[in-house]
């Protein structure tokens, strides 16, 4: 049973476009929602994260929007660049035990020059 | 400071063979994790270790065993490899005071 559902599976945008990746969760105990970026042949790396007490967080060209009542969150990439081409994973965690992360299934983003 | 290191990078096994994947971190982190990554499935937690001396099952532990050798090292063992264990395996660590996990570069395992 997938605890975090992610869509779309793949996304192609032109340079300068704004790709949006969506995630949804059911477990209201989750209190940390990170996004990881993974380039081919590499391990995932933390990109940006949000707590449920805020509705939006921006870091550079990356923005997380969070809707607590709908149990959904999304990643927006402003002015996307070919170097943003990667696989993006959303995840969720709760402050219990070892801070285990539950990952979405991933979105492969391609930014065309 | 190398972060999280994993060996080997690639491995091919025959069905029924055994092997151990090694992971080490030099960040003095308390928690360590093993994930597998399969196309369309994301990353799924196999086992984790909240602190030195403890290990617990994750979502997909069947067919695997782990050892938290010391604070730095966390190994994953396949006793009798099966084709269904063909995957990319990632080790990660977490300091314990924050949620962020730091991932190693992965081991690509093929079982024929």
Image (cartoon, coloured by chain):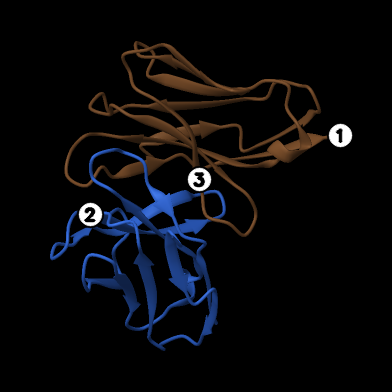
Chain colours: A brown, B blue
* Residue at mark 1 to residue at mark 2: CA–CA distance: 43 Å
Say which quarter of the image contains residue A20.
top right
Identify which residue is drawn at 36% across, 63% down: B25
Q: Could you say which is closer to the camera, residue A76 or residue A46?
A: A46
Could you say which disc has been placed on residue B30 in the image?
2
Which residue is denoted by mark 3 in the rendering? Answer: A45
Give residue B61's position: percent from left, percent from top: 29, 63
Residue under the image location 27 percent in, 57 percent down: B28
Compared with B107, A94 (above or below) is: above
SS at circle 2: loop
Find residue A10 and report its horizontal and vertical position in percent.
67, 38
Q: Position of residue A58 (x, y in %)?
A: 52, 18
Q: Earlier in the sequence, mark 3 or mark 1?
A: 3
Q: Residues within 10 Å of mark 3 (few under 14, many from 20)?
A: some
Q: Is residue A7 left or right of residue B49?
A: right
- Identify residue for label 1: A113
């Amino acid at each position: 049973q997938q605890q975090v559902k992610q869509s779309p599976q793949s996304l192609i945008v032109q340079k300068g476009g704004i790709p949006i990746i969506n995630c949804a969760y059911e477990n209201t105990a989750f209190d940390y929602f990170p996004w990881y970026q993974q380039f081919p042949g590499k391990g995932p790396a933390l990109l940006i994260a949000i707590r449920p007490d805020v509705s939006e967080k921006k870091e550079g060209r990356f923005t997380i929007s969070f809707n607590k009542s709908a149990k959904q969150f999304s990643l927006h990439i402003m002015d996307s660049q070919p170097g943003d081409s990667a696989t993006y994973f959303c995840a969720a965690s709760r402050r219990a035990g070892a801070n285990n992360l539950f990952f979405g299934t991933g979105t492969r983003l391609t930014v065309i020059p | 400071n190398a972060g999280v290191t994993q060996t080997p990078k690639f491995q091919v096994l025959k069905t029924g063979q055994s092997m151990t994947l090694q992971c080490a971190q030099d960040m003095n982190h308390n928690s360590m994790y093993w994930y597998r990554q399969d196309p369309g499935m994301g990353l799924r937690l196999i086992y984790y270790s909240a602190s030195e001396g403890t290990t617990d099952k994750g979502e997909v532990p069947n067919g695997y065993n782990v050892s938290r050798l010391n604070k730095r090292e966390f190994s994953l063992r396949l006793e009798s490899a099966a084709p269904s264990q063909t995957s990319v395996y990632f080790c990660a660590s977490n300091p314990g005071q924050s949620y962020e996990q730091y991932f190693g570069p992965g081991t690509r395992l093929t079982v024929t």
